[in-house]
Every structure is written in C-alpha cells, then in structure tokens.
Amino acid sequence: MPTPASCFFLLLLQLSLLLPTSCSDHSWNYKSESPNGPSHWQLGCKGNQQSPINIPSTGLASVTSSHLDFSHYDLEPAKAILRNNGHTVKLSTEAATPEKTPVLSGGGLPHSYKFSQVHFHWGAEDGKGSEHLIGDTAYPMEMHLVHYKATHGNIKDALAEGAYDSLAVLGFFFQVSEEPNPTLAVLLPHLDEIKKAETETVSSIFPISDLLTGDMTSFYRYNGSLTTPGCNEIVQWTVVKDPVPVSMDQMNAFRQLQTKESEPLVDNFRPAQQLGDRQVLDVTTAQLLIKGSHTFSPADRVRGSMVMLVVVMVRMVRMVSL
Ligand SMILES: [Zn+2]
C-alpha cells in the first residue's frame, strides 16, 4: 500500500493515463453528475491552456508546413501490451532496441518526439465520443498517439520537465462507415480478453504505421494539456482533420469494455475546455512519408522555417498583447 506521502507525490506527477498508479485512478471519473467528475478535477485541471477544445471551423490562421515525418513507425515492435485501465484501452509497445523506437518530427513541431502509447476515447452512441470537437461537432471516437520529447530517456522524465512542449499527441477522429477499419480489426479480438478493468493481454504485433491510415497532410495545431488529471499543460496537439473509418460492430466492441465499477466503459471523453487567448493553427503540408528515415529536401526546410517564423511571430504578438 502506498503511504500518504508517496501517494501525494504520485498525484503531483499525475501519470494516471500515461502510466499506471495505485492511488489516483479511483479518484476521478467522466460522470458529469459525480463529485469526482470532470468539473471537479483538481491539480492542474483548472488552468487556462487545457485540452480538449472545440476547434473553431472558421477564422483560423492557415499555415503551410513541412510534412509530418514518421521514422521507424514501419518497424514491428518487440512487444505490445493492450490494457483496460478502467478509463480507456491503451496499447503500449516496446521497440526491439532503443534506436528502433518510432520518432515523430516535422509538421512544424518544435522537436522530435518518441512514441509511447496509443489509446482511445469513445461514446455510448455515435453522436459523441471524441474529445476534440470541430465547430461543435463530435465524432464517435478519437485515438491519441502519445509521444515524449526525444531528448528524454522515458516519458516520466518528459513529464517531470513540464515544459509546454514536453509531449506531442497526435489525435485522429473516427467516422462510422460500412467498411471495418483494418488495423482495429487486428486489435479488436483482444478486447474480449480485457473486458474487466485493470486487465491486460499481449497483443498481436504490428507496426504503428498501420494505425496511420488517413490523410495527414491537413491538421490543427495548438498548445494544450493532458485530458486526464492532473491535466499537465505540456502537450503540442496535432489533431488530424480527415476522419478514419470504423464500422458499427467495431464501435460496439469498445462499448463492451467495463469500468472498475463493472459499468460499461463509454463516454470516456473530457468536455471541451475554454480556448481562451490561444491560437489554433490550420496546417497544411505538402507531402507525407511514413516509411523509414527521411531527409528533408531544401524546399521542406524553407517551408519548415517559414512555419516556425509564423509561430514565433504569433507568440510574440500574444506576449505583447498580454
Ligand atoms: Zn487521450
């Protein structure tokens, strides 16, 4: 059993979705009427750079960027664990060697980021489920690929750094379609094995690039937070515009999972937070490469520099106006 002091320390670090903890998981939930529901979340959750947000569908600053660069996403991990932690289902992978860890860069991101885990947020019905909204519209499910700044050895160190850009999360929307999603089809048979909260199973091995099926040349970028307590404001958010398909049966497989109270694990999304004075960039990239390492062309470098210049100028204007 953790001592009160160690429990408090763990709460301060807030690792509840990103890492398993033994004392904070039971202290929050997604029920709006509960005393532990989202409007009562403590720690950093009352800040003014919170996520998710309702992304305005018009009036955003449009920028062009170098493409998102996915290095080593095409390599199969040595190990993949799928876990129901009572709040979500999460796939964590272990690369064969540290050098083979998938690394995300480009797309106007300020650093390179190592892949850590992927998890999902979904609704009881198709009209809700995503954390981010686009012009007040929700999707039935949203997938988050969580990355940490590559200069750190692990995600704990990146959380401890606590900078506005310590993590990079890539979000994808799902849209119900006739066609099943082929990658989810690989994961879904395992959901039966982890219906109960706090259970896990060894997943089939597949490269993370299999999850990147949509058009990633168009996305939103803003500074935000983790969407679970303690809501650390350390995330560079990339929310891909183009939704990817999911069949009705696949959605229902997620809805069979259970919380720690043995209730259906559904509606595990945080409501939209205030955008405040933050800027959301509407980013378009020229091209996309996933396979292996990629060397930027001179044109990419010029475009990337232009995006960084725009971002810096926007931040300067904001600082001046504060
Ligand atoms: Zn998430």
Image (cartoon, rainbow, N blue to C red):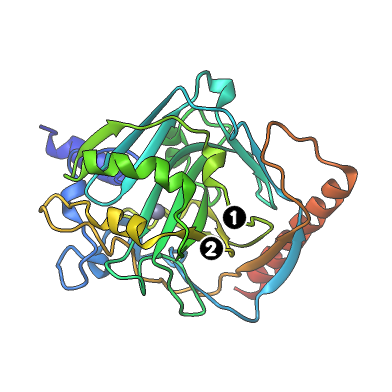
Q: Quadrant of residue 79?
A: top left
Confirm whether residue 57 shows in the render: yes
Name which residue lies at 59% across and 22% down.
Answer: 99
> 301 or 5: nearer the eye?
301
Q: Which residue bears the numbered disc 2?
A: 243
Q: Which residue bears the numbered disc 1?
A: 214
Kind of residue sitting beneath label 1: Gly
Confirm whether residue 13 shows in the render: no
Name which residue lies at 38% across and 39% down.
Answer: 91
Q: Quadrant of residue 29?
A: bottom left
Distance from the alpha carbon under mark 2 to that under mark 1:
7 Å
Q: Quadrant of residue 157?
A: top left
Residue 143: give x, y in percent of width and height. 44, 54
Name which residue lies at 57% across and 33% down.
Answer: 102
Q: Residues within 10 Å of mark 1 (few under 14, many from 20)?
A: some
Horizontal relation, residue 36 to residue 43: left or right: left
Residue at the outermost front position: 178
Name which residue lies at 22% across and 57% down.
Answer: 265
Identify the mark nearer the N-term, 2 or 1. Answer: 1
| The N terminus, quarter of image | top left
Secondary element type, mark 1: loop
> 251 or 38: nearer the eye?
251
Horizontal relation, residue 302 to residue 152: left or right: right
Q: Residues within 10 Å of mark 2 (few under 14, many from 20)?
A: some
Tell me the number on the disc at residue 195.
Answer: none
| The C terminus, quarter of image | bottom right
Secondary element type, mark 2: loop
Asked whether disc 2 touches disc 1, contact meaning CB atoms under 8 Å apart, the reply is yes
Residue 48: give x, y in percent of width and height. 44, 67
Residue at the outermost top position: 97
Kind of residue sitting beneath label 2: Pro
Residue 139: give x, y in percent of width and height. 43, 69
